[in-house]
Image (cartoon, rainbow, N blue to C red):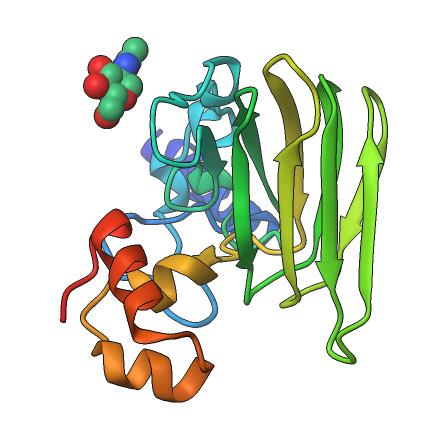
Amino acid sequence: MYLPFFFVLTLLVSLHSATAGDYCVADLKQPEGPSGYSCKTPAKVTVDDFVFHGLATVGNTSNIIKAAVTPAFSAQFPGVNGLGLSIARLDIAAGGVIPMHTHPGGSEVLVVIQGCIKAGFIDSANDVYVKTLNRGDVMVFPQGLLHFQINAGKYPAIAFVSFSSPSPGLQITDFAFFANGLPTELVTGTTFIPGDVVKKLKAVLGGKN
Ligand SMILES: *[C@@H]1O[C@H](CO)[C@@H](O)[C@H](O)[C@H]1NC(C)=O
């Protein structure tokens, strides 16, 4: 009587755990390592781990760059962990910019949804690739290279960007130089940017020293 039931239960459990290799939904309670988050117990995975609603929301562009990046990386969208991809939304108000930055972990493909964006990157030979993009245009930014997007129109621009990593990272170059405690003399010494300019930028971006 109980034996078949136990057999079916065992079968169901093993069928369920057989799906574990299909995905590795991020367990956000554990720290993220170089190869991503560890996997949430498959029994606790739900459809909502694979769905992200945040890109429907207009980003808040009331800031110094007049732009917003809304990421759907593993930390926000646990279902992409381990899948080698992720997505984000860019909102760039008129006069706004996503300043020169890099994503150390992945290449990026951008599609303009609304407005006009001038985008570009600089390769490691320091050659520059810049293009003005309109609705529907797509541009790709190779992994790790410095790049930017600037609103080239009079109206708010929107783009979606996808990455070849669930956790591509985002390092804004100006913030790296001028929004931390790296002493002015070291910024000047390593970039040749005059100290008074460094101090001005630190004041604007929140850097110290
Ligand atoms: C947008 O951000 C600014 C600055 O942080 C804040 O004052 C404002 O309330 C935010 N607006 C919305 C709609 O969240």
In the rendered image, residue 105, in percent from the top left (x then y), is placed at: 56, 65
At 83% from the left and 57% from the top, the residue drawn is 129
- The furthest residue to the left: 209
In the rendered image, residue 194, in percent from the top left (x then y), is placed at: 38, 75
Q: Which quadrant does ligand 1 occupy?
A: top left
The count of marks equals: 0
Q: Residue 124: which quarter of the image?
A: bottom right
- The furthest residue to the bottom: 189
In the rendered image, residue 53, in percent from the top left (x then y), is placed at: 47, 18
Q: Residue 172: which quarter of the image?
A: bottom left
Q: Is residue 15 visible?
A: no
Q: Quadrant of the C terminus?
A: bottom left
Residue 171 vs 78, above or below: the answer is below
At 52% from the left and 13% from the top, the residue drawn is 56
Residue 22 vs 169, above or below: the answer is above
**Which of these two is toward me, 78 or 107?**
107
**Which of these two is toward me, 151 or 50?**
151
Q: Is residue 72 left or right of residue 152?
A: left
Q: Is residue 154 visible?
A: yes
**Which of these two is toward me, 126 or 77?**
126
Q: Is residue 40 left or right of residue 152?
A: left
Residue 90 vs 58, above or below: the answer is below
Q: Quadrant of the N terminus?
A: top left
In the rendered image, residue 66, in percent from the top left (x then y), is placed at: 44, 28
